[in-house]
Amino acid sequence: DAGVIQSPRHEVTEMGQEVTLRCKPISGHDYLFWYRQTMMRGLELLIYFNNNVPIDDSGMPEDRFSAKMPNASFSTLKIQPSEPRDSAVYFCASSFTAGGNTIYFGEGSWLTVV
Amino acid sequence: GQQVMQIPQYQHVQEGEDFTTYCNSSTTLSNIQWYKQRPGGHPVFLIQLVKSGEVKKQKRLTFQFGEAKKNSSLHITATQTTDVGTYFCAGLPLNSGYSTLTFGKGTMLLVSP
């Protein structure tokens, strides 16, 4: 299996621009997670889906952030408009069942907003 | 909500020294998992502990789950430079229903040759 695939791997954008991060989970996994990692805040869960349905988005920092999962093999995390404080590594991850089973992380999207 | 605390936040050891990181949960856990993240990499699953008092070993790594299922530890014997990285624990609350793992903030390990 190719694992969780994220794109882009690196993005540098100007403040105010829209950013779209993409994720393809491992085939057969029914949970998909979006995490954000910074030195200050560590690894934060932003939102997770089960069978393409958003279950908990309480970690989404504000309305500028939105996530969708139109089908079992694709998800997006969008930031509009982006701000410098959004600079972080964004990880997509998937698992077969929430919690009890292993969470497989993608390699991350490194976002810098200048 | 549930909180998972890890200590220390950071540790720098000489190669060959031992290392231990501790994980404490504010609530009783159904299970706990440990992940390792190499510098510039992504978290990778190491192990899962489920039973009260459980001890598991992976070569030089020893993982323990407390009797009360609220704490856990990871001990590395005779560290090597390949052990460098951040170690995260992640716990699932007992009777959590529709929930997911809560990650600690991690312990960053630096090993000098």
Image (cartoon, helix red, strand yellow):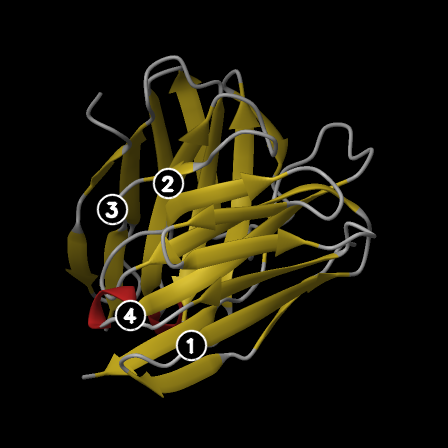
Task: Judge from the rendering whether residue B80 lies leftward or rightward of residue B66; answer left or right.
Answer: left
- Mark 3 vs 4: CB contact within 8 A: no
Q: CA distance from mark 1 to mark 2?
A: 33 Å
Q: Residues at marks 3 and 4, common chain?
A: no
Q: Nearer the viewer, mark 3 or mark 4?
A: 4
Q: CA distance from mark 1 to mark 3?
A: 29 Å
Q: Nearer the viewer, mark 1 or mark 3?
A: 1
Task: Judge from the rendering whether residue A56 lies leftward or rightward of residue A107; answer left or right.
Answer: right
First-in-chain label (1 vs 4): 1
SS state under label 4:
loop
Tag 3 residue: A107
Q: Which mark is residue A92?
A: 2
Q: CA distance from mark 2 to mark 3?
A: 8 Å
Q: Residues at marks 1 and 4, common chain?
A: yes
Residue B45 visible to the viewer? yes
Q: Residues at marks 4 and 2, common chain?
A: no
Residue at (29% x, 66% y) in the render: B83
First-in-chain label (2 vs 3): 2
What is the three-letter code of the residue carrying label 3? Glu
Q: CA distance from mark 3 to mark 4?
A: 18 Å
Residue A87 visible to the viewer? no
Tag 4 residue: B84
Q: Chain of mark 4?
A: B
